[in-house]
Image (cartoon, grey):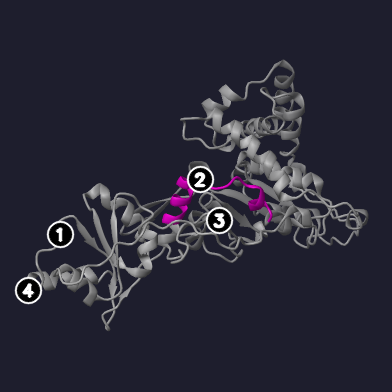
Amino acid sequence: KNSLPIFLGILAASEELPPLPADAAFIGELSLTGRLRPVSGVLPMAMAAPRLGIRQLYLPAENAAEATLAQGLTVYPVETVEQLVAHLRGQTPLSPAPIWQPQPRERQQQPDFADVMGQETVKRALEIAAAGGHNILLIGSPGSGKSMLARRLPSILPDMTREESLQTTEIYSVAGLTEARHPLVTSRPFRSPHHTASAVSLTGGGAVPKPGEISLAHNGVLFLDELPEFHRDVLEALRQPLEDGIVTVARAGGTLRLPAQFQLVCAMNPCKCGWRGHPSGKCTCSDKEVEKYVQKISGPLLDRIDLHVNVPSVEYEAMRRKSKPESSAQVKERVDAARAIQSRRFDGTGIPCNAQMTPPMVGRFCELDSRCDALMKSAFERMGLTARSHDRVLRVARTIADLDGAEHIGVEHLSEAIQYRNTDILKG
């Protein structure tokens, strides 16, 4: 699709144009009418250009704002090939594009926790997940509010940094999802693929490799509703990205590595019919059917999810309560304060939050006193925790302590973290 350079090469070879500037690059698809059509992947190319000695970039006008997000370049927006030829011949110079600056725009109304009646325990778990960047699984009957609660998580996540925005925009640029008027992604992505999605649509790839859902969720949230309904190979494809923050796509033409540092939020019913444990007693599933349903999710995948939370049915009294629930803005203040503690703790390490601590960091920043150590040992043996889940409990406990403003993990912090690993809720 990058036909403009070929056209210019032909003109230069036939001496219809003077020699092209050595420090210039040309990007664009040439239409039959001579107009330049926009192309995808402009930002990664623009950011790579200065490293290759390129100082001038000529490209379709619709891509110009996105290209100016890169530094060290003079970007020339081109409407038609006639304009470009006249510029290269020195007849009618093109004007460089001004560096794009975020303009005041109407803020999209995000779902707010103030709209959710009751479910205080689940809100607390989501606050912990946001404060430490932890993965979370919500388990409850239909109508209990799992999806509604999950969709409100982005409203309490920290604002994106400039670096995070550029990283995410590069991915959206390659996928062809950037906007000409607002090219920079400034809100954390929230991706929610349907449970019929294929492994390729999730991880990326294809004949012309493109980022999948887990890369489009980079620096944001990947929400998988009806988790057991996803194909097994799709769920297993999540394991490597959850561990490494990178997805590797191997194809006959080569291997592609894409960033995939996302926060996983999952929701599921407790059984196939969905009513296991509901006060109505409507569940028709046998114990064997419940076990078969839950076993669709592998142990290694569950092990990588930090918090397992039961979402009970909302009580009538909660629905009729007159007092307004806490807003997302109020919760976000506590989340931002906890993240500020983590930012100071991990300064210079490249680690942004507790969930991404390396094992040596867990040993250093999650030290336990004798009482906490006895509690952890008891939980480890009683619950049959793995080494991975042991470290994940400690990371969650560190986040709870940060929300509390505590320097050290206390028994109350560790106890709360352990209760979020209660796998009994997955057994009905």
Q: Nearer the viewer, residue 245 or 120?
A: 120
The residue segment tinted magenta is: 152-170
Residue 166 painted magenta: yes
The circle drawn on residue 144 is: none
* Residue topped by disc 2: 161
N-terminal label among 1 and 4: 4
Please give the residue where the numbered disc 4 appears in the rendered image: 14
- Alpha carbon distance from label 1 to label 2: 36 Å
The kind of residue on which mark 4 rests is Ser
- Spatial CA distance of label 3 from label 2 is 13 Å
Task: Say which element carries label 2.
Answer: loop
- Packing grade of label 4 (10 A; few <14, some 14-19, many >=20) is few
Secondary structure under the numbered disc 3 in the rendered image: loop
Q: Which mark is residue 21?
A: 1
Near mark 2 (Cα within 10 A), the count class, few <14, some 14-19 or many ≥20, is few
Q: Position of residue 61 (x, y in %)?
A: 34, 69
Q: Where residue 105 appears, x then y in whole percent?
A: 56, 62
Q: CA distance from mark 1 to mark 4?
A: 16 Å
* Label 3 Cα neighbours within 10 Å, binned few <14 / some 14-19 / many ≥20: some
Kind of residue indicated by mark 2: Thr
